[in-house]
Image (spheres, rainbow, N blue to C red):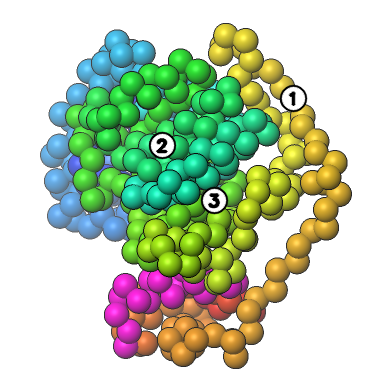
Amino acid sequence: MTEQEALVALNMMQGVGSMTVLRVMERFGSAASFFDLTARELATLQGVGSERAARIVAERGGIPYQQEIERAEGCRVKLVTLVDDDYPDILRKIIDPPPVLYVAGEPRVLKQTGCAVIGTRHATLYGKETARRFGYQLAAAGYSVISGFARGIDTEAHAGAVQAGGVTVAVLGSALDKMYPQENKQFAREIVEKGGAIITEYPFGRVADRQTFPQRNRIVSGMSRGVLVIESPLKSGTLITVAQALEQGRTVMAVPGRIDSTASMGSNRLIREGARLVTSVDDVLEELQELFADVRMRPHGGGDTLQVEEQVLPHVLASKQRVEHPAPESLLASDERKVMASISDEGSYADTIVRESGLEPGKVNSILVSLQIKRVIKVYPGGLFKRFK
């Protein structure tokens, strides 16, 4: 079994997540070694245990990974694994990178410098027009526009990038053969035909559910240098993506909306809590200005040939670098101070913070996002929250 085959097989196994795959590779040197480990050896991995290890050993020999590979080839879907050159380096560095990406389209565009554009499914006309405009302008400026292919803001951002003749990458919360939403199937073909890509981490047959979308969101932010929020209510999957983006060290930006619109309450709150206020594409380019010295890869000609180009916008590069300072704790709201007081000097996990603060879990999660944006706390691998020193 090759390393690529092992990663495809592991990605298909129930109960084996990306963190377990990484731990196997780090401890035993390869993903392929997983299939030679005893149940006792597997049980020593963090989060596995003896019962789960025994179940994995009993099931691992029956994974039809060869059929999965053959099906992908028959559908002209490329399987890009963690050890392949086409796997995006920026995504490989997140805490839990997907072992395999199923790619419809050109895999090499996954390594183009990207910016995520995200927001509510229930977008207003203002939100849709804004998302399409930013998608167009970011693509025209040489960025890959990355989003989750959902109705509303996501679809409009993808559409703007396609209209600009640029690259967009749509990340699904389902398998490629179980595309959601169904009405975007034809648009998906157009994205691929115009040089973009539709990707997912899910094997064939996996339908979207409540677990797949949050998992999908970490890829959207993980592939992006920055995340731009356009319309988000207070309770939204968009804010989950924001939390993941902060954990991954990505910059967060937001477009302001009407103060009386429920569709904009979440994005307006992000701005109040320290996200970069964006009113034009120049604001985004300024926030990401250090990237303009990078060499970017863009599709050219028929899509198989890639052209290396450097883009320089003097008015952006000449702008002053913003220096962000953590918000003084005296300016925090009372619930925010409660959460801060619940974080020990060595750091605390979310469940401990909930217990110590006495606040509802949903409230604590919202406050933790707010405090990260305000740069008074930082989240470390494994979900450990610490105060900024």
Instruction: Identify the residue at image location x=51%, y=26%.
Output: 162
Q: Residue 324: x, y in percent?
A: 70, 68
Q: Nearer the viewer, mark 3 or mark 1?
A: 3
Residue 141 in view here: yes
Secondary structure state at the residue bearing disc 2: helix
Badge 3 vs badge 2, beta-carbon distance below 8 Å? no
Distance of mark 3 from mark 1, alpha carbons? 24 Å
Secondary structure state at the residue bearing disc 1: strand
Residue kind at label 2, given as amino acid type: Thr
Badge 3 vs badge 1, beta-carbon distance below 8 Å? no
- Is 213 included in the stretch rendered in magenta? no
Distance of mark 3 from mark 2, alpha carbons? 14 Å
Q: Which residue is mark 3?
A: 228
- Is 359 included in the stretch rendered in magenta? yes
Q: Which residue is mark 2?
A: 155
Mark 1 crowd level (few <14, some 14–19, many ≥20, 10 Å Cα): few
Secondary structure state at the residue bearing disc 3: strand
Q: Residue 384: x, y in percent?
A: 45, 70
Q: Which residue is mark 1?
A: 309
Dot placed on the residue nearer the N-terminal end, 2 or 1? 2
Query: Magenta part of the protein: which range?
Result: 358-375
Q: Nearer the viewer, residue 242 or 188?
A: 188
Instruction: Identify the residue at image location x=65%, y=48%.
Output: 280
Residue kind at label 1, given as amino acid type: Glu
> Would residue 378 appear left or right of 37 to someone viewing this image?
right
